[in-house]
Amino acid sequence: MRKFPKDFLWGSASAAYQIEGAYNEDGKGLSNWDNFVRIPGKTFKGTTGDLAVDHYHRYKEDIALMAEMGLKTYRFSIAWTRIYPTGNGKLNQKGIEFYQNIIDECLKYGIEPMVTIFHWDLPQSLVDQYGGFENRKIVDDFVNYAKTLFKIFGKSVKYWITLNEQNIFTSLGWLTANHPPGKFDDQKMFYQVNHHAFLAHAKTVLAYREMGFDGKIGASFAYTPSYALDCKPENAISKLNFDDLKNYWWLDMYGYGEYPIVAMKYLEKNGLAPEVTDEDREILKKAAKEINFMGVNYYQSCVCEYNPLDGVTPYGVMNTTGKKGSAQITGIPGLFKNPQNPYLKTTDWDWAIDPIGLKYLCREITSRYRLPIVISENGLGAFDKLENDNSIHDTYRIDYIREHLKTLYQAIDEGCNIIAYCTWSFTDLLSWLNGYQKRYGFVYVDRNEETGSLDRYKKDSYYWYKTVIESNGEKL
Ligand code: BG6
C-alpha cells in the first residue's frame, strides 16, 4: 500500500511574470522581462506577460479553485518590482497589499504559501544602475528585498525559496541569449554572475536565520539527472563532466557551500573562474549548513556521450514551437554532448519523459547531501483542446504526473525525505519563450497568443489530482 507521509504537501506552482499581468499597475516598476519580450523575435509570436492570465485581478477565483481541489501548498513568486519598483528605492505599499492578500487568501483555506523570492523578473532599474547580477552590488539589494519580505510576511509564510533555477536564468541569459540580458557566449561573466547569485542566496538564508525565523528555506534548482550513453569509459567520464559543470556546480554550492574541485580546475585553466574572496567562502559555507531542503524542478533527464573537440556546441536551436524533432543536440566540445535517449518518449517540445529520472535524482540528493527534498516543479507542457462542452481531456498529463508520483513514492519508500511535490502549474500560464500554446495547468485558461476571454475551465487532470490529494497519494 502506498503511504505518502502524513503531512505531505501536495502542491502546485506558478511564477509572477507568467500569471499576474498588470505589468504597469498600482506602482509596479518595469522588470528586465517587461523589456526583453518587446525585442522582436525573442518570444514565440512576440508574446508578453503584460496581461498573462490576469491573476492579478482574478487571484480570488484561482485560489478558490485551489481550495476546492484540496491543494495543501501553493508555490508562487513575488515580483520584486511590485515591492521595490526600482529594486532598491522606495517601498510600494500596493505591491505589499497584493501579496498580503494572496497569502491571506491561501491561509483562509488552509493552503500553505510557499514563496519564491526571485523567479527571474529582475527590476530593470538595477540593470540600468549597475548591470544587475553582473555587479556585486546586486547582493545587498537582493538581501534588502528579501529581508523586507521576511519582515512583512515572515510570520505567515513558513516556506521560502530564494532563487528559482539559477542555472537556467544564467545559462539562457549569458550563454545562449534566450533570456535577458540576451548575451551570447559570455562565459567569464556567466560564472561571475552565478557567484553573485550564490552570495545573494547565501546571505538571504543567513539573514532569515539572524532575524529569528524558524521556517524552511532553500533554493530551487533545475535538475537534469544524467545517464552515460553506455559503458564505454569515455562516455562514463563525459557523464562526470556533465554532472560537475551542469548539476553539481549549483547543487554543491547550495548543499556544501563549495564549488566542485574538477569543474573549478577546468574553469581556472580556461580563464573562466569567478572572483571569490575568503569572506565569500566563509559565507557560502555557513549558509549551506542553514538550508532546510533542496528544491528541485524536474522535467527531464539526459544522456551523456563523449563530444570531440570539433563536436556540437552549447548553442543549438531550441524547440519553442512545439514541432517535434526541431531541437538540436548540444554539448561542450571535448567534454560531453547530450544525444536523445532511445528508451524514452519525448514531449512535443522535445523534452524526454522520464519518471525514473525523478527517483534517480531524489536518491542522488539523499546520498550526496542528506537533505530533505521539495519537488518545486514537475509537469507536462502540451497542446490542450477545449471541447464544445468546455471539458479538456488531458489524459496525457494525468499519465505523466501519475508515473512521476509512482517513482517519487518509491524514492520515499527507499528512504528519501520528500516533503512536498508541486506540479507545474495550477492554471495555464505564459511559457516564457513558448507563448500560451504550451499549457501546463490543471485549469485551462481561455486565451491564445493574441486574445481570449480568460475564463477558467477545469481539465480532467484537475479532478484526478483532487482524488490523489484526498487519498494522500493512494489513488493514482
Ligand atoms: C521552469 C521554470 O524552467 O520550467 C518555469 O521555473 C517554466 O518558469 C517551466 O515555465 C517550464 O518551462 P517552459 O519553458 O516550458 O515554460
Image (cartoon, helix red, strand yellow):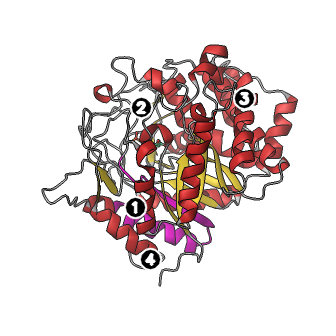
Q: Residue 16: horizontal and vertical position, in percent? A: 50, 41
- Between the residue at mark 3 and the residue at mark 2, the CA separation in whole angstroms equals 35 Å
* Number of marks drawn: 4
- Between the residue at mark 4 and the residue at mark 2, the CA separation in whole angstroms equals 42 Å
Residue behind mark 3: 141
Reply above or below: 379 against 32.
Answer: below
User: Quadrant where the C terminus lies?
Assistant: bottom left
Q: Residue 41: horizontal and vertical position, in percent? A: 33, 20
| Amino acid type, residue under disc 2 in the picture | Thr
Quarter of the image holding residue 258? top right
Q: Are marks 4 and 3 in contact (CB under 8 Å)?
A: no
| Amino acid type, residue under disc 4 in the picture | Glu
| Amino acid type, residue under disc 1 in the picture | Leu
Reply above or below: 260 against 318.
Answer: below
Q: Can residue 245 be seen from the camera position used here?
A: no
Reply above or below: 246 against 114.
Answer: above
Residue behind mark 2: 330
Mark 1 lies within 8 Å of ligand 1 (Cβ measured): no
Q: Which mark is residue 470?
A: 4
**Magenta stretch holds residue 414:** yes
- Between the residue at mark 4 and the residue at mark 3, the CA separation in whole angstroms equals 42 Å
Q: Earlier in the sequence, mark 3 or mark 2?
A: 3
Residue at coordinates 55% horizontally, 44% vertically from top-left? 98
Q: Earlier in the sequence, mark 4 or mark 1?
A: 1
Q: Residue 362: horizontal and vertical position, in percent? A: 57, 60
Of circles 4 and 2, which is in front? 4
Q: In this view, does 130 lie to the left or right of 68?
A: right
Residue behind mark 1: 65
Q: Give the range drawn in magenta.
A: 400-428
Q: Earlier in the sequence, mark 4 or mark 3?
A: 3
Of circles 3 and 2, which is in front? 3
| Amino acid type, residue under disc 3 in the picture | Asp
